[in-house]
Image: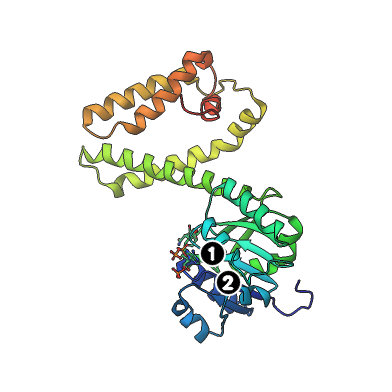
Amino acid sequence: GNHHSSPATVSVLGLGLMGRALAHALLRAGHRVTVWNRTPSKADALVADGALLAPSAGDALRSADLTILCLTDDEAVRSLLGQDGVDLRGTTLVNLTSGSSAQARETARWAERRGARYLDGAIMAVPPAIGTADAVILHSGPRTAFEEHSPTLAALGTATYLGEDPGLASLYDAAGLTMMWSVLNAWLHGTAMLRTAGVDAASFAPFAQQIAVGVAGWLPGYAEQVDGGSFPAEVSALETDARAMSHLLDESEALGVSTELPRLFKALADRAVAAGHGSEQYPVLIEEFGRPTP
Ligand code: FVH
């Protein structure tokens, strides 16, 4: 571990679009950076910027207090680190490769069996944001590993620790993506409906933004209902929403736009109403989301 005050020596394995951004941010923060990539030419600009190019992944690991992995997927991570000459004993790995929570837990076990400390991470940002506070990077795994290396991880963006289960960062990443795509798809559906009446996207956007921010404001109160398991209808009952969903479906059909989203909304609500939850508040639908789709 890096016990002296000077910036840590960090190695970065994987110099794709994201890996290069990570390595450049570490250099800018004054760290000694060793890099390795399967295709060495991708290291050229980093070497010109002061990084050290290791001849092998094993060499890169050996020299570092902390090794950051940013490959295509966890399969690539395990095949790379499983090669001869790669000794994981005593290293701390921070895996910023995207993957499922099951893959993160499996890679954590795989790495710990080989003597490494393993911190998983999920980057909620694109390469240009790396090194700024806008780049939220979620971490899960041993709290001691996060705390020991958080000064270094802070060079990449806003490092957020979620808990000891290594699968948490991937789960939050997936939940964040479902929020992002839901808002974008809903906005596109609304835009498509309004365009049939000649209203352009720019005209709808401020209204759409206002709705998105308003609904976001409900989440903490609704979360209390979900955690408490009780959904008293304070502002509206699910059966009122279900009726409005039928209207949205009729409207979408009449306008000749896609009906996939309204059908999805209606199917969920109708199932919950059929199960007797029509007089409860919208978050009662958590029960539909918490089981495999019939
Ligand atoms: N780019 C982004 O905006 C997203 C933001 C959110 C997080 N993702 C995840 O970051 C991982 C890397 O993504 P990337 O965009 O850097 O991907 P590429 O530019 O395609 O680089 C892939 C690197 O992986 C190396 N690689 C692939 N397979 C192997 C292997 N079997 N052995 C060794 N290295 C391997 C590849 O090497 P090379 O092709 O240059 O030789 C690249 O260095 C990813 O999980 C995103 O989901 C980025």
Instruction: Please state the horizontal and vertical placement of residue 204, each as a whole percent of the image.
Output: 32, 44
Residue closer to the observer: 38 or 244: 38
Residue at the right extreme, as displayed: 3
Disc 1 Cβ-to-ligand 1 distance below 8 Å: yes
Instruction: Please state the horizontal and vertical placement of residue 262, each as a whole percent of the image.
Output: 35, 29
Amino acid type at image mark 2: Val
For the residues bearing labels 2 and 1, Cβ distance under 8 angstroms: yes
Q: Is residue 237 above or below residue 191?
A: above
- Residue 108, quarter of the rendered image: bottom right
Q: Tag 1's secondary structure?
A: loop
Q: Which mark is residue 192?
A: none
Instruction: Please state the horizontal and vertical placement of residue 287, each as a whole percent of the image.
Output: 55, 25
Ranked by sequence position, the earlier of labels 2 and 1 is 2
Q: Is residue 183 visible?
A: yes
Q: Is residue 68 above or below residue 181?
A: below
Instruction: Please state the horizontal and vertical placement of residue 219, each as a whole percent of the image.
Output: 56, 37
Q: Tag 2's secondary structure?
A: strand
Q: Which residue is mark 1?
A: 70
Residue closer to the observer: 145 or 90: 90
Colour mapping: rainbow
Q: Is residue 207 above or below residue 278?
A: below
Q: Which residue is mark 2?
A: 12
Count residues near mark 1 (Cα–Cα under 10 Å), then give few for <14, some for 14-19, many for 20+.
Answer: many
